[in-house]
Amino acid sequence: MSGNKEEEDPRINGIKTKIRVVPDFPKKGIMFQDITTVLLDPKAFKDTIDLFVERYRDKNISVVAGIEARGFLFGPPIALAIGAKFVPLRKPKKLPGETIFEEYELEYGNDRLEMHVGAVEVGERTLIVDDLIATGGTLCAAINLLERVGAEVVECACVIELPELQGKQRLKGKPLCMLVEYR
Amino acid sequence: MFAAENGLKGDPRLEAISAAIRVVPNFPKKGIMFQDITTLLLDHKAFKHTIDIFVDRYKDMQISVVAGVEARGFMFGPSIALAIGAKFVPLRKPGKLPGKVISESYELEYGHDRLEMHVDAVEPLERVIIIDDLVATGGTLSAAISLMESQGAEVVECACVIGLPEVKGQHKLKGKPLYVLVEPSGLDEFC
């Protein structure tokens, strides 16, 4: 799905046109990629999920991990369709059981991503899902969490990539699948 | 109303769903028996049963909007929306939605919080179901109902996986029907 224009699935343009760009959110200079408008279009939303499901259904993926909160919008439907577990990766103190955490950098300061201990077993083939990849910091933290418990991260899947931020370089060599680029 | 009293009595799927939910004592604070649905999400069959039961209920009710309350409502709502051909509308904590929003405040044990929705998400007369993982006092769901009604939409039902004892016998929330799959696990030990 990332790559040549000639290979582009016709559903992708339909999804791209539904993404709303909101200037200066959350602060001046940022062109925010709003996927809520994709969710308002049942066909575009279904196409988004179908494109990922078609890619992953025969890859023996047993875990789909989704990053809070917009990863929760795409991850569970994919997990259900491919027969995998869904594992939420959450902000601190939301998960009630025993957790492990990974810190990552924000523009100012740090944040943490947490996962329940025992959610993922050693050797499980895992897909990580989020709505968008920017710098790749959050996805890198997610990869670290999963690798620490012995899972195999097969790929990261995002609806949107901001290629100028070069997030792809921060995925510890893991491949990225995205549907739409925003330049 | 509970699913078992409304057509699904003895349905083995409900038992599987209940068994898959983990109880975590004293989270987020002492005395609370937290109903953890993450273990349900780890059980593919039970998770699928959960979605299937809601989809079977709503697929012929001309629902055009499934609204989900952040964040655990996001784990169930989109799959239901996709299966019944409805839009999914996220109802979020303040400051998360980028476009123009309307908001409604609701009470917490100490203080208030707010729920926000994009103004253009729902149109007048749309038929809506509102999803969350669990209903306790109904405060959050009431705020969600207010948001929908302020846009002229019709809330057909509120749907939750788990309903706390406070809601048993209370079939309606702000006059709207409430549909719940299971009661909380583990409360007997607590009492």
Image: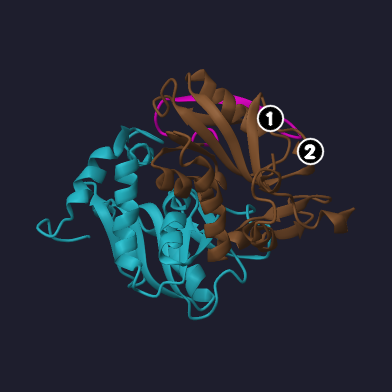
Labels 2, 1: one chain: yes
| Residue in the image at 58% along x and 33% along y | B157
Judged left or right of residue B37, residue A56 is: left
- Residue at mark 2 to residue at mark 1: CA–CA distance: 12 Å
B11 relative to B181, above or below: below
Q: Nearer the viewer, residue B47 or B146?
A: B47
Which circle marks residue B159 in the picture? Answer: none
Q: Residues within 10 Å of mark 2 (few under 14, many from 20)?
A: few
Residue annotated with mark 1:
B172
| Residue in the image at 66% along x and 24% along y | B174
B124 relative to A78, above or below: above
Judged left or right of residue A136, residue A120 is: right
Q: Which residues are magenta?
A: B92-111
SS at mark 1 in the image? strand
Three-letter amino acid code at the position of disc 2: Glu
Q: Main secondary structure of the magenta part?
A: loop
Pinpoint residue B4: horizontal percent, then vertical percent.
69, 48
Pinpoint residue A51: horizontal percent, then vertical percent.
29, 57
**Residue A166 visible in the displayed image:** no
Q: Residue furthest bottom?
A: A123
SS at mark 2 in the image? helix
Look at the image and name its color scheme. Answer: by chain
Pinpoint residue B44: horizontal percent, then vertical percent.
53, 65
Magenta residue check for B104: yes
Q: Chain of mark 1?
A: B
Colour cyan, chain: A
Q: Nearer the viewer, residue A162 or B32?
A: B32
Which circle marks residue B166 in the picture? Answer: 2
Judged left or right of residue B168, residue A79 is: left
Q: Residue furthest left?
A: A6
